[in-house]
């Protein structure tokens, strides 16, 4: 790392560029701002279409859930909204028929499967009176999360669930 004698912020117009003048030689050198700090042959990984999945919990759930229930979890992971893990439009108001169609399962297995997933803490059901009553589901962030920053309150809502306990034990 180079030691600099001076560091100055200079306001410039769009047609002006900063320059260094060597007082001893009179040499003028344009100062170029470093465009980025990425190493050569590297690119910034855009995460908007990617989800972080907890491999430890996926292993745990694959032992505890049926293949159909695990498929529902992975479909939920894909449905989760960026930075909130909301599963909108899913809510307690979603019909069994709509759940069966959304997740590609038999209508006869919907109730039992979703009760089991709820019991494990795979998702939470929220109902809040804010600009009218809003009801929605949220995917457990101990399983998966989309985004860069997560509110502590989202973590707190899932404390004590079977998934969170497995995360801390497994």
Image: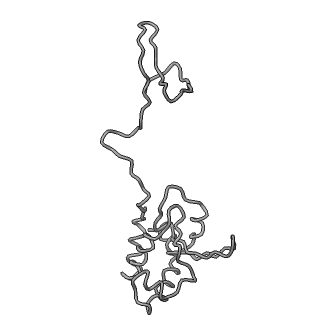
The percent position of residue 108, horizontal first and vertical second, equals 44, 93
The percent position of residue 47, horizontal first and vertical second, equals 42, 56
Q: Quadrant of residue 10?
A: top right
User: Is 49 above or below relative to 133?
Assistant: above
Does 105 sit left or right of 140 as displayed? Answer: left
Q: Residue at x 57, y 72 (%)?
A: 160
Look at the image and tell me in which quarter the N terminus lies. Answer: top left
Viewer-proximal residue among 91 and 27? 27
Viewer-proximal residue among 24 and 164? 24
Q: Outermost residue toward the front?
A: 15
Look at the image and tell me in which quarter the C terminus lies. Answer: bottom left
Q: Quadrant of residue 127?
A: bottom right
Q: Residue at x 54, y 83 (%)?
A: 94
The percent position of residue 123, horizontal first and vertical second, equals 52, 75
Q: Outermost residue toward the bottom?
A: 108
Q: Residue at x 46, y 14 (%)?
A: 21
Q: Residue at x 49, y 58 (%)?
A: 147
Does 156 sit left or right of 22 as displayed? Answer: right
């Amino acid at each position: 790392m180079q030691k600099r004698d001076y560091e100055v912020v200079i306001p410039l117009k769009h047609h002006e560029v900063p320059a260094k003048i060597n007082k001893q030689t009179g040499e003028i050198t344009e100062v170029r701002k470093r465009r980025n700090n990425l190493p050569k042959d590297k690119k910034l990984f855009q995460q908007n279409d990617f989800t972080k999945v907890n491999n430890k919990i996926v292993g745990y759930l694959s032992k505890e859930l049926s293949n159909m229930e695990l498929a529902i979890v992975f479909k939920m992971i894909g449905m989760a909204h960026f930075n909130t893990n909301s599963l909108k439009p899913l809510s307690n108001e979603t019909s069994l028929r709509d759940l069966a169609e959304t997740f590609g399962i038999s209508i006869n297995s919907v109730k039992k499967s979703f009760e089991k997933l709820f019991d494990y803490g795979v998702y939470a059901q929220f109902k809040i009176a804010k600009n009218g009553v809003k009801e929605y589901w949220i995917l457990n962030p101990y399983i998966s999360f989309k985004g860069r920053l997560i509110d502590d309150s989202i973590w707190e809502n899932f404390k004590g669930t079977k998934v969170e306990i497995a995360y801390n034990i497994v």
